Image (cartoon, grey):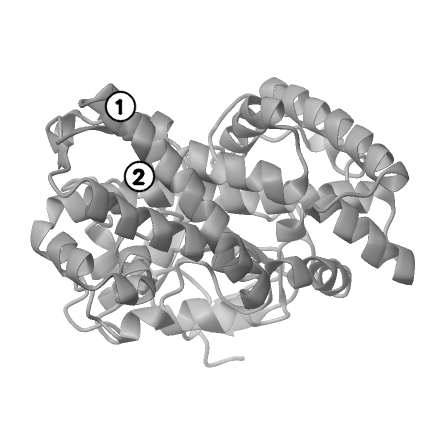
Amino acid sequence: MSDLVDACPHAQPRPFPLERTGCPLDPAPEYAVLRETEPVSRVKLRFNGREAWLLTRYEDVRQMLVDPRFSSNMADPGYPLQFHFPMELLGKVKPALLHMDPPEHTAHRMMLMPELSVKRVEAMRPRTQEIVDECIDAMLERGGPVDLVSMLSMPVPSIGMCELTGVPHESRDLFHRWVTLLVTQGSAEEHASANAEVEVLLYELIAERQKNPGDDLISSLLQRNGEKNELEPADISALVRAMIAAGHESTVNGITIGTLVLLQHPEQADWLREHPELSGQAVDELSRYSSISDHGTVRVALEDAEIGGQLIRKGEGVICSLSASNHDPAVFKDPNTLDLTRREARHNVAFGFGRHQCAGQMLVRMQLEVVFTTLLRRIPGLRLDAALDELPFKANALIDGVHELPVTW
């Protein structure tokens, strides 16, 4: 590996996350410069001062995400942690699927995937349509302006996830608070408290479903585990937590930011309104264009490895910019333009890539398809009821979004 670069040419690593100096919906402009001049660069996390490598090219990101020399283990000292987490819980609580490595990750993911197959997800579409219509009925009955987040973005995945997993509807607020803490910089105490509440509730549900199985995810996991006897209750709890975390926050912010992007591009909204049968293609492009989970995909090197001609040493952390990757002109022509007719958008990495590609992406995509087509059809005059720069964008979060989205019609 003597021909590899073994040092960053910059004396000081850049503070990360990078600042967005333009439109809050656009990637940090420095990403474009880095892709051309320094696609694998050193950064220093604003959160804790740790240093890591930042990847901004599409091919480099995909290469790293399939390389077994990079780990998802957040307990590794070199892991580029970007949020508060009570590290004393590590070893006491089963890690989430997102933070497992093979072979454990493979076995656990295989237990979950039958519940998220294309066939199973499509079977959920009629009920999803009912939930979306009920939410829009409530919006229309109240009359504008309304907050789209509280009336549509949050209820759709919350109700759907409760019904899928078997979690009582009255526990929706607890799980929303817990998931929000996972992707924001809440305190370690807040994380520990919410995590403990969720654990208690899930253990109670698992014990109850063992006695009285139902038609839900927990019951299915218990039945499948009974055939193989590979998982303990703590493993079942971790899988359910992974499902809720992956499916809830991605959909909430995907609905909100996707709607906001469509309102900023009315000609594209008109196209989708006229072509609802191509909603899957539209969701691909909206996911590529907004890439709401920009820098939450991270790894740590288990041994020396080369990415993009750069030597990454064992124990060094790596951050993938999914937004920079999805705006790579080497892959996506005119990447800063929203084009719902774009066929190559299906190759985006908004849901990750490789073995850790989002397990619930089919469910999220289906929910977004139903929401966008129904919203545009039923409220054709929908418009933003505030200036873009007045919206309360989420700060210091691993998933982009806004706390409120006032709309009217």
Name the foreground residue: 202 vs 132.
Answer: 132
100 in relation to 88, above or below:
below
Name the foreground residue: 319 vs 238.
Answer: 238
274 in relation to 165, above or below:
below
Coordinates of residue 339 in the picture (x, y in percent): 17, 64
Tag shown at residue 154: none
Query: Which quarter of the rendered picture does the N terminus lie within?
Result: bottom right
User: Tag 2: Cα neighbours inside 10 Å, few (<14), some, or many (≥20)?
Assistant: many
Reading the image, the residue beneath label 2 is 256
Looking at the image, which residue is at 18% across and 22% down? Answer: 145
Looking at the image, which residue is at 36% across and 26% down? Answer: 150
Coordinates of residue 332 in the picture (x, y in percent): 23, 72
Name the foreground residue: 132 vs 36.
Answer: 132
Looking at the image, which residue is at 36% across and 39% down? Answer: 133
Q: Amino acid at mark 2?
A: Thr
Query: Which quarter of the rendered picture does the C terminus lie within?
Result: top left
Tag shown at residue 141: 1
- Closer to the chain start, of discs 1 and 2, is 1
| Distance from the alpha carbon under mark 1 to that under mark 2 | 20 Å
As drawn, is 314 to the left or to the right of 310? right
User: Tag 1: Cα neighbours inside 10 Å, few (<14), some, or many (≥20)?
Assistant: few
Coordinates of residue 297 in the picture (x, y in percent): 49, 53
